[in-house]
């Protein structure tokens, strides 16, 4: 099977910050010790919720930055 992984980071230096954000998001969602958890034992919904919540936060951060820091 060929590995067609195109998930290259646009800013490789952000990897640590994204990992920290993932752990904080998982903790907020009640998934403590997410870093050491076997992700295969979580439901797809649980794993997807962490990624989806992270994406929502990142979009909100970008929108705020693009609007000059103004909030809703």
Image (cartoon, rainbow, N blue to C red):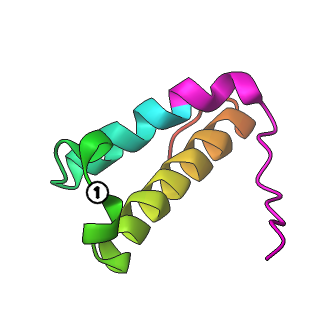
State the extent of the magenta-drawn residues as a range.
1-17
Q: Residue 16 location in percent, x, y?
A: 54, 25
**Image quarter of residue 55:** bottom right
Q: Residue 42 location in percent, x, y?
A: 27, 69
Quadrant showing the N terminus = bottom right
Q: Which residue is mark 1?
A: 38
For the residue pair 12 and 28, the one nearer the viewer reads as: 12
For the residue pair 58 and 40, the one nearer the viewer reads as: 40
Give me the residue at 16% from left, 45% from top. 32
Q: Is residue 59 left or right of residue 24?
A: right
* Residue farthest top in this picture: 13
Give me the residue at 58% from left, 35% from top. 70
Q: Is residue 31 left or right of residue 38?
A: left
Q: Secondary structure at mark 1?
A: loop
State the predominant SS element of the stretch in magenta: loop
Give me the residue at 80% from left, 66% from top. 3
Q: Residue 62 location in percent, x, y?
A: 66, 42
Q: Residue 58 location in percent, x, y?
A: 57, 46
**Image quarter of residue 50:** bottom left
For the residue pair 69 and 47, the one nearer the viewer reads as: 47
Whether the magenta-drawn stretch holds residue 5 is answered as: yes
Q: Is residue 42 above or below residue 50?
A: below
Q: Is residue 27 left or right of residue 14?
A: left
Whether the magenta-drawn stretch holds residue 62 is answered as: no
Q: Is residue 24 visible?
A: yes
Q: Is residue 36 above or below residue 17?
A: below
Q: Is residue 11 above or below residue 58?
A: above
Q: Is residue 69 visible?
A: no
């Amino acid at each position: 099977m060929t590995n067609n992984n195109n998930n290259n980071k646009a800013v490789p230096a952000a990897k640590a910050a994204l990992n920290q954000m993932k752990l904080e998001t998982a903790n907020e969602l009640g998934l403590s010790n997410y870093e050491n958890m076997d992700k295969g034992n979580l439901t797809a919904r649980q794993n997807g919720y962490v990624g989806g919540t992270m994406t929502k936060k990142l979009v909100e951060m970008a929108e705020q930055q693009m609007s000059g820091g103004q909030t809703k």
